[in-house]
């Protein structure tokens, strides 16, 4: 049973749900972070304090302090008459109180954040709302928020609105990573169909189990192989140390006879320089941004994964927003999502062009990498590895009803049934 504690200055009890993935030291750190963010807001993202008041939702069980402060952390305005923010008029409609959202976004070094996410919140939102609403945003890797804890922090209300990397959920919630399993989507069209098949389940599960209202799904360009030594195909990876970003990518590389090396995006260059890895799986354009075209010689453009993320809000923060703000976001965020997907397709091709020094390169730095054609044999091997290694290992890591989830979503879409392992 969950432990029960007495709330200060109140004759009520709070039921606390322990989280197995957080060690005691981590619990203390996030408790302190929750207090800091709830009281002071996301300081890295918001230059000045914004008055806020949590929504009132009537009688009900007392929630954790972080959850109870979610609406406040989202920066709902305070009405002069002291009424709850949930029923407040839009900021600027006679109250004079600004309504500023606080967002934690994607990786700051990539164009998705700089070109799409940040401008949407800091420029488009004020313009579309006629100045009634504004937002401050900071990428999670600059806000001191580990990507692996983002979903949990949004669930608690510590982060009111944020972007969660799907690959960061591989250990805690592998069931949510199914649509981007290595080898599943050789084209962006395949990925679109996978997300379409999986999205209803993901949206419902996040809402019911994590107090998370999913509002958009983003994608990075294709995650491909950059290698220092001569490469003619997947068979050449035997014995090579290959940078990966998730357990699922590691399954794919290990099944090829390679040696997976878990490395954060920001440490890819250092890993290659130190000789800890000889190849790296990363995005075609992000690899160019990192300068991998100067450190590696061979580019193998088979998409191993793509790199999905989803954006959403803590349900308390979402419900506390004015209705017209929610209506605006539900109308405009799908447009932002589609723009991100178009960019991923463009940047996948642009990354290959720039890394190889093609004339069509206009956005990145031209390199002189050798682009190795994907053979029919490797295409067949991709499909075999998905069925024989990646999917079975995903099911073993994924407790509960993951075979049922697969067979209700992606299995029928791809004609690949899943069976529960021993």
Image (cartoon, rainbow, N blue to C red):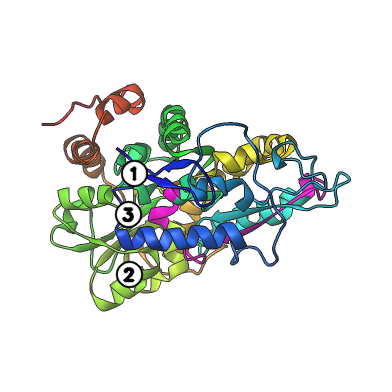
| The residue stretch that appears in magenta | 127-152
Front: mark 3 or 2: 3
Locate residue 132 relative to residue 137 in the image: left or right: right
Residue at point 60% right, 60% down? 39
For label 3, the residue is: 22
User: Against 326, is 30 above or below?
Assistant: below
Q: Position of residue 389 (x, y in %)?
A: 17, 40
Where residue 113 appears, x then y in whole percent?
56, 57
Instruction: Judge whether residue 334 can be spotted in this image.
Output: no
Which residue carries the number 1 mark? 3
Q: Which residue occupies the foreground of this view, 401 or 21?
A: 21
Q: Would you say 99 lies left or right of 41 here?
A: right
Q: Which mark is residue 369?
A: none
Let me know if residue 130 is in the magenta part. Answer: yes
Going from the N terminus, do you reach mark 3 or mark 2 first?
3
Which numbered disc, 3 or 1, marks the residue closer to the eye? 1
Q: CA distance from mark 2 to mark 1?
A: 53 Å
Q: Position of residue 138 (x, y in %)?
A: 58, 61
Disc 3 crowd, CA 10 A, few/some/many (<14, 14-19, 20+)? few
Q: Circle 1 sits in a helix, a strand or a loop, which is it?
A: loop
Which residue is denoted by mark 2 in the rendering? 296
Query: What is the tally of numbered marks visible in this picture?
Result: 3
Residues at circles 2 and 1 in contact by the CB criterion of under 8 Å: no
| Secondary structure under the numbered disc 3 in the rendered image | loop
């Amino acid at each position: 049973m969950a432990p029960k504690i007495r709330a200060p200055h109140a004759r009520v009890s709070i039921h606390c749900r322990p989280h197995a993935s957080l060690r005691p030291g981590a619990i203390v750190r996030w408790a302190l972070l929750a207090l800091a963010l709830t009281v002071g807001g996301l300081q890295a993202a918001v230059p000045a304090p914004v008055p806020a008041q949590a929504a009132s939702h009537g009688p009900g069980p007392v929630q954790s302090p972080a959850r109870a402060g979610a609406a406040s952390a989202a920066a709902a305005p305070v009405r002069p008459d002291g009424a709850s923010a949930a029923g407040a008029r839009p900021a600027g409609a006679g109250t004079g109180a600004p309504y500023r959202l606080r967002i934690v976004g994607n990786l700051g070094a990539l164009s998705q954040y700089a070109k799409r996410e940040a401008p949407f919140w800091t420029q488009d939102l004020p313009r579309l709302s006629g100045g009634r609403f504004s937002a401050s945003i900071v990428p999670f890797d600059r806000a001191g928020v580990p990507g692996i804890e983002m979903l949990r922090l949004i669930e608690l209300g510590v982060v009111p609105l944020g972007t969660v990397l799907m690959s960061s959920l591989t250990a805690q919630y592998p069931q949510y990573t199914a649509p981007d399993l290595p080898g599943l989507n050789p084209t962006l069209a395949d990925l679109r169909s996978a997300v379409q098949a999986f999205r209803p389940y993901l949206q419902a599960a996040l809402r019911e189990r994590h107090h998370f209202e999913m509002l958009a799904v983003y994608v990075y360009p294709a995650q491909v192989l950059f290698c220092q030594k001569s490469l003619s195909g997947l068979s050449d990876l035997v014995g090579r140390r290959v940078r990966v970003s998730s357990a699922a990518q590691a399954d794919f590389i290990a099944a090829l006879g390679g040696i997976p090396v878990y490395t954060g995006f920001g440490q890819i260059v250092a890993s290659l320089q130190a000789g800890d890895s000889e190849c790296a799986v990363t995005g075609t354009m992000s690899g160019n941004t990192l300068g991998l075209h100067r450190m590696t010689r061979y580019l193998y453009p088979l998409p191993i994964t793509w790199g999905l993320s989803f954006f959403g809000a803590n349900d308390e923060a979402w419900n506390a927003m004015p209705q017209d703000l929610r209506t605006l976001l539900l109308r405009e965020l799908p447009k932002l999502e589609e723009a991100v997907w178009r960019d991923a397709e463009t940047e996948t091709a642009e990354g290959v062009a720039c890394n190889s020094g093609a004339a069509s390169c206009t956005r990145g730095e031209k390199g002189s990498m050798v682009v190795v054609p994907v053979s029919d044999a490797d295409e067949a091997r991709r499909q075999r590895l998905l069925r024989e290694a990646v999917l079975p290992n995903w099911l073993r890591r994924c407790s509960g009803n993951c075979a049922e989830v697969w067979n209700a979503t992606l299995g029928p879409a791809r004609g690949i049934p899943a069976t529960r392992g021993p």
